[in-house]
Amino acid sequence: MNIEKTLNIMLKGCENHTEKNEIIEKLKKVEKEGRPLRIKLGLDPSAPDIHLGHAVVLRKIRQLQDLGHEAIIVIGDFTGMIGDPTGKSKTRKQLSKEEVEKNAKTYQEQIFKVIDSKKTTVKYNSEWLDKMNFRDVINLASKCTVARMLERDDFKNRYENQQPISVHEFFYPLMQAYDSVAIKADLELGGTDQTFNVLMGRNIQKDYKQEPQITLFMPLLEGIDGIEKMSKSLGNYIGINEEAKTMYEKIMKIPDNLIIKYYELCTDVYPEQIDIIKQRLKSGENPRDIKMELAKEITGLYHSREETEKAEETFKIAFQKKIAPDDIPILKVNTKQQNVGLAIVDALMLAGKYKSKSEIKRLMSQGAIKINGEKVTEISLITEIKSDTIVQVGKGTFYKLEI
């Protein structure tokens, strides 16, 4: 194991984590034992549609799997019948066993679009929680005080506002923490909103005489509005099951100030490469061009190369039409007489705006000519065009090609 490389990839994009020294010691320990890290991720099967916000921790798991480690996905079929109280202002509706099983199946179909199924074990926490007797439950409950539970913002706010808190809700963080004991987790991941639950796992492992898991907390991802946390209910989400065209277009809507965050949390691009992208933005490169690279990178993680390239081309044409005037002049291009690039030069000459073909070629070499939104600097690079292709010369001159 290259511990330095593992640490760099592990901490890429993390908002908070266990002390570095403890992480390094854990990595050294599993290497000495000749085994991979056992990475825990608990999934509460209450909302089965996964979007890029959910996929942030899944991408982190995949990055660690690519380094040889293994994931244990704990489907909370038992805890799901209680419901995670995190961020809730009232007691959640308990799901039926049938609802939990249906959602869990949908979850599995989606998570393996991100993580490596060959390096993943799926467990249901009913395997151990359903077998606990009342003595076991009392013993587990003795590991945490009521005062500690009321440190959670959601419980604290409900208590102070005299809103009801059912006793069974206190068991949710205890039960999911016991999951770490049951699978002997080395590492647990979660969003920053799961800090209380994940840290509870560390504490419970100590109580059960296990070495505590290390922790990684990923930041919550803002949606395409750039303001609120990505959420299906808010309509600002990008679903991992959406068509390539839709996914690409949605990514292009994110604010420029989120480009780097999306690179860090939604892609597998190495930190060194992201540093280069940061410099490109600082140097004044058009953020739209870098965002198109980002859209292609993310879309390509969930769709085929062909689908991704088609989505990119569709966006370029749509974007170009959007900024082009409605009364755009049409240039007729004869592609049978010569190569495509020269045919476009001849067509531009017929527009009557340019003194010579040399002037057009010079404009092209200076990056002043775009075809469907993409700069073309050499005639030889133009190998294929279609009717309705948009040619832009300078900032405000547009033509539509007709073959």
Image: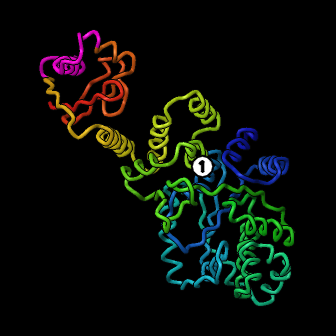
Region rendered in magenta: 336-359
Residue type at the position of mark 1: Leu
At horizontal 74% and vertical 62% (from top left) the residue drawn is 185
Residue 137 position (above or below residue 283) = below
The answer to whether residue 188 is above or below residue 326 is below
Is 352 colored magenta in this rendering? yes
Which residue is located at x 67 percent, y 72 percent? 86
In the picture, the quarter occupied by the C terminus is top left
Which residue in the structure is indicated by mark 1?
A: 265
Observer-nearest residue: 344 or 269? 344
Residue 395 shows in this picture: yes
Please state which of residues 212 and 371 is positioned toward the viewer in this rendering.
371
- Residue 141: name its quadrant: bottom right
Rendered position, 222 above or below 203: above
The stretch drawn in magenta includes residue 301: no
Which colour assignment does the render follow?
A: rainbow
Is residue 268 in sight in this rendering? no
